C-alpha cells in the first residue's frame, strides 16, 4: 500500500535537522524523555513572529497605529500563550466568561477585551460589564435587550457593537463557516439597520462599533473584501441616520498551511484590508483584528509515542498514545495534520492509518501516511497549536496531556499533566 505524498506546512519554531525534529533549539526526543507523551509543545519564537507579521501592517509609514490585534483566545487559551501576546501588545477576543477570567488573570487591560459569542448568559454579561470591557458584540435582538436589562440592574452603560451576518461564503468547512444566512451567528444583513436604530433608543446601551466574522481557516482574501465592503456600506448608512460608529471589528479566520494550502502572507493580507478601509474613507475608525489560528496554529505540535504497529488485510495501523481526546480536529472535521517521525529511522516505509486507543472508530489522527517507524518511536503531529488542547476531553477517563513552552534552549511546563485521580476527585458515590 502506498499513499500520495502530501507536503508539510511551513514552520518557523519547529525544524528538521538531519532527520531529527527540534522545537527551537531542543530535540523533540529530549522533551519526550523529560516530560512524557502525549505532549503539547509550543514555540515562543513562532508565536512572536506570527504576531509581528500582523502588527507590522497595523502601523502606517508615519508610525500611526491604524489597527490593533485582539487575539481570539478560543484557538489556544493557555495562560502562558495569552500572556505572551499581552506582552507583545495584543488585546483579546473572548467568547465565554471563562475566557474573560483567563484574560483578567494575566492582567489584561479590560479596555482591550471584546466579548463575543452567540449565547452569553446574564451572568456572563454582568461580569463583562462589571469588568468594564471595551465592547460586547451583540448577536441577536433578544441578546441586545438582555444586555440592556442587565446594565439597568447594575446601573451602568453597556458598550456594544452588532455582529453583522453579511451572507458571504467564506469557502471553508461548513462547520467553521459563520457568515452565511443559514449560520447561527450574527444579525441578518437586512435586519442590521433596524437593530441599530433599536439599540440607539435603549436606555443603557452605548453603540460604539460594528463587527463581522465570516468563518475560520479561510485561505483567500476575496471573501473578506466582500464582507468588508458590505459592512462599510452599513457604516455609511448609519452615519446618515446620526448613529456614529467608533470602531470596526473585522474578526479573524485567516487560515494556515496544514499541508498544501497557500493562505496569503499575513502582512500583505492585513495591508489589503486596512487599505480598503482607508480607500473607502473610513480610515478614522479604530480597527480591530481578531486572528486566532494564524497566530498559534503552526506554533505547536502534539508529540506522541507509537504503542503498536498492527498490520491488516486492508489497512496497517499505527496505534499511538495520543487520541481524539488530545486532538479532536481529525475526527470532527476530517482535518489533515502533517505527521512526521521525531527521529530519523531506517525502518521500512509502510502506509499506516495513525490511530489512538480510544474506543471509537472515529479515533484517528491521520490516514494513509507513509512512515518508516517502529514500536516505541515518537511521532510529531504538526500544526496542532490551534484548536488542539482547548478541544481536548477526558473521554475514556483519559488525563489531559502536559503543555510545554519552548523559548530557545529552555523548556517550561505551562500546564502540568493531569493525574487520573484528578478526573474523579469531585465525584461522590451515593451513601450506603
Image (cartoon, rainbow, N blue to C red):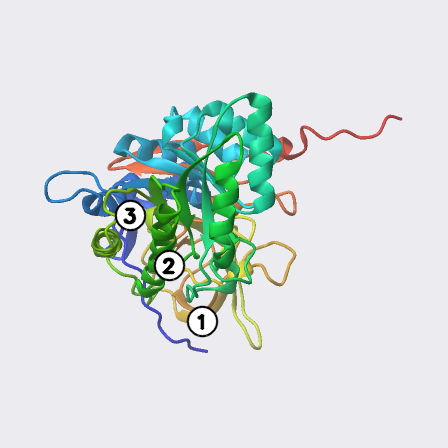
Residue 45 vs residue 227, the one in the foreground: 227
Q: Earlier in the sequence, mark 2 or mark 1?
A: 2
- Number of labelled discs? 3
Q: Would you name the residue on which mark 2 appears? A: 230
- Please provide percent x and percent y for residue 137: 47, 41
How crowded pointer 2 is (Cα within 10 Å; few <14, some 14-19, many 20+) is rated as: some
Q: Earlier in the sequence, mark 1 or mark 3?
A: 3
Callout 3: helix, strand or loop?
strand
Image height of 62 relative to 422, above or below: below
Among all residues in the image, which is located at the extreme left?
62
In the rendered view, does 124 fall on the left or right side of 370? right
In the rendered view, does 269 fall on the left or right side of 248? left
Among all residues in the image, which is located at the extreme front?
241
- Please provide percent x and percent y for residue 309: 51, 62
Q: Earlier in the sequence, mark 2 or mark 3?
A: 3
Task: Decide if residue 289 is in sight here.
Answer: no
Q: Would you name the residue on which mark 1 appears? A: 351
Q: Are marks 2 and 3 in contact (CB under 8 Å)?
A: no
> Who's the residue at 49% across and 58% down the image?
190
Image height of 254 relative to 108, above or below: below
- Please provide percent x and percent y for residue 250: 36, 49
Amino acid at each position: 500500500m502506498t499513499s500520495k505524498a502530501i507536503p508539510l506546512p511551513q514552520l518557523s519554531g519547529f525544524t528538521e535537522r538531519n532527520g531529527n525534529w527540534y522545537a527551537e533549539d531542543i530535540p523533540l526526543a529530549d522533551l519526550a524523555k523529560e516530560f512524557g507523551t502525549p505532549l503539547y509543545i509550543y514555540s515562543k519564537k513562532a508565536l512572536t513572529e506570527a504576531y509581528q507579521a500582523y502588527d507590522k501592517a497595523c502601523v502606517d509609514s508615519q508610525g500611526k497605529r491604524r489597527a490593533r490585534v485582539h487575539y481570539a483566545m478560543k484557538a489556544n487559551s493557555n495562560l502562558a500563550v495569552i500572556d505572551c501576546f499581552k506582552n507583545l501588545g495584543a488585546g483579546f477576543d473572548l467568547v465565554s466568561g471563562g475566557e474573560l477570567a483567563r484574560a483578567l488573570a494575566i492582567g489584561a487591560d479590560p479596555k482591550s477585551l471584546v466579548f463575543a459569542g452567540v449565547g452569553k448568559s446574564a451572568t456572563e454579561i454582568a461580569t463583562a460589564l462589571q469588568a468594564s470591557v471595551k465592547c460586547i458584540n451583540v448577536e441577536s435582538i433578544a441578546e441586545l435587550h438582555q444586555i440592556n436589562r442587565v446594565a439597568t440592574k447594575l446601573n451602568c452603560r453597556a458598550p456594544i457593537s452588532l455582529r453583522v451576518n453579511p451572507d458571504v461564503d467564506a469557502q471553508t468547512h461548513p462547520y467553521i463557516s459563520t457568515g452565511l444566512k443559514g449560520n447561527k451567528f450574527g444579525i441578518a444583513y437586512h435586519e442590521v439597520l433596524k437593530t441599530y436604530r433599536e439599540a440607539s433608543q435603549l436606555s443603557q446601551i452605548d453603540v460604539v462599533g460594528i463587527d463581522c466574522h465570516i468563518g475560520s481557516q479561510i485561505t483567500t482574501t476575496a471573501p473578506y473584501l466582500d464582507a468588508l465592503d458590505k459592512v462599510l456600506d452599513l457604516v455609511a448608512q448609519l452615519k446618515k441616520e446620526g448613529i456614529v460608529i467608533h470602531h470596526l471589528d473585522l474578526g479573524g479566520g485567516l487560515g494556515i498551511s496544514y499541508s498544501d494550502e497557500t493562505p496569503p502572507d499575513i502582512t500583505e493580507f492585513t495591508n489589503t484590508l486596512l487599505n480598503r478601509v482607508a480607500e473607502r474613507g473610513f480610515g478614522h475608525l479604530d480597527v480591530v483584528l481578531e486572528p486566532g489560528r494564524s497566530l498559534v496554529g503552526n506554533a505547536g505540535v502534539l508529540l506522541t509515542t507509537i504503542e503498536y504497529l498492527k498490520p491488516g488485510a486492508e489497512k496497517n495501523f499505527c496505534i499511538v498514545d495520543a487520541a481524539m481526546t488530545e486532538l479532536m480536529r481529525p475526527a470532527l472535521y476530517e482535518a489533515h495534520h502533517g505527521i512526521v517521525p521525531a527521529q530519523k529511522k531506517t525502518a521500512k516505509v509502510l502506509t499506516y492509518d495513525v490511530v489512538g486507543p480510544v474506543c471509537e472508530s472515529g479515533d484517528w489522527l491521520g490516514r494513509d501516511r507513509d512512515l518508516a517507524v517502529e514500536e516505541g518511536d515518537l511521532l510529531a503531529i504538526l500544526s496542532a497549536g490551534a484548536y488542539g488542547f482547548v478541544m481536548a476531553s477526558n473521554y475514556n477517563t483519559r488525563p489531559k496531556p502536559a503543555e510545554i513552552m519552548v523559548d530557545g534552549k529552555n523548556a517550561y511546563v505551562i500546564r502540568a499533566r493531569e493525574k487520573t485521580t484528578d478526573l474523579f476527585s469531585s465525584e461522590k458515590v451515593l451513601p450506603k
